[in-house]
Amino acid sequence: MEFFNPALEDNITFVRPAYFYIGGFVGIPNINYYFFFLFFVYVFSVLGNATVMVVIIFDNTLRGPKYVAVFSLALTDILSSTALVPKVIDIFLFDHRYISYNECLTFMFFCFTLLSMQCLNLVALSYDRLIAIMYPLHYQIKLTRTFMINLIIMLWLIVIILVLIAVGLITRLSFCKSVVINSYFCDHGPIYRIGCNDVTPSRAVSGLLPILLLWIPLAFILATYGCIGYALSKISTAQQRTKAFKTCSGHLSLVAIYFLPITFVYGAGSKTHPNARIINLSLTTVIPPLLNPIIYVFYTQEMKQSLKKKQYNPYIPKCNNLCKKSKF
């Protein structure tokens, strides 16, 4: 294998390869059809999320804190799909499996940052639903648009810092035995496992990050819906409870679409075939961005009304009135 000259830092020699080799999707017949499927999923997810973003930008009625989080979710979906799908298609469909060391770490950073932010956007939306149900009369006071913007910014900073730590620890590893990554992208776990020096810090971060960026957010979301369920139980009539619960149905669908496949993949662990695990993981990263805009359009009354609005030209009525008075 081709390697860079070892770099001596603090009396420790780090052997960094010139490239890594992405080894996922091995021995699957007709796998090229899967990449065409990923391409169409990517196109429709970008179009759908872009539509949601445009509607929120140009409709003045969609200025509440909830739509700040919805906008952030749509933006994250576009960026995460764009960071992952075109590169995966290029790697496997066009057989560009060799990726340079620096490019691989950059690829890892953007994928993990954006995929993790998808989860934290759901946390922001769950907090919005909690305040809306628990304090309906004080919702606009307790949860302002500015607060939601600051919350989203804080979540972005947390994710960026945590992923930078994980990627930074990879740079402390030497790769002197293998450069083959047994995944479909520059995945953190498969990369640190092929390191030939002490991988303990990377292993610790690999165990900690899913807790911080996946399981704790899921626990928070479940706790918020426990509180919401308790609040709804105090409402006197079933009709009022149903009406209040409908406001959460869209968000619950997003949570289920995001967490159920990931829980299944991580729960199965090593019992699944490597190819099946790679396909399941790749689907869990591309299907939610496709379905999120569809769900929010169908489950959110304001979004449906905004999309149904017709363009109104103020000069048309004047023209019609003038035409009525005209001899022509």
Image (cartoon, grey):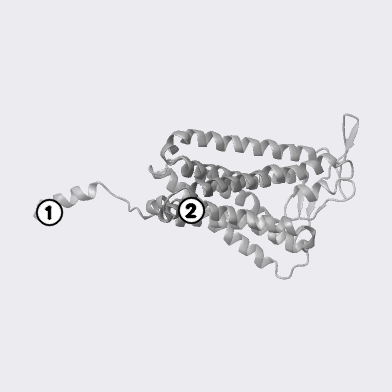
Give the answer, above or below, for where 34 lies relative to 143: below
The image position of residue 52, as x and y in percent, is: 47, 50
The Cα atoms of the two marked residues, 1 and 2, are separated by 44 Å
Residue 264 visible from this viewpoint: yes
Residue extending furthest bottom?
29
Amino acid type shown at disc 2: Tyr
Give the answer, above or below, for where 196 lies relative to 253: above
Badge 1 crowding class, 10 Å Cα cut-off, few under 14, some 14 to 19, many 20 or more, is few
The image position of residue 33, as x and y in percent, is: 65, 67
Amino acid type shown at disc 1: Lys
Image quadrant holding the C terminus, namely bottom left
The image position of residue 282, as x and y in percent, is: 67, 57
Q: Secondary structure at mark 2?
A: helix
> Which residue is nearer to you in this view: 169 or 124?
124
> Which residue is nearer to you in this view: 132 or 209?
132
Q: For this view, does 183 lie left or right of residue 113?
A: right
Dot 1 and dot 2 residues touching (CB under 8 Å): no
To which residue does mark 1 refer? 324
Q: For this view, does 10 lie left or right of residue 101?
A: right
Residue 56, by quadrant, is: top left
| Pointer 1 or 2: first along the chain | 2
Q: Nearer the viewer, mark 1 or mark 2?
A: 2
The image position of residue 76, as x and y in percent, is: 57, 46
To which residue does mark 2 refer? 296
Q: Secondary structure at mark 1?
A: helix
Give the answer, above or below, for where 294 lies relative to 198: below
Q: Which residue sits at x=80%, y=41%?
A: 204
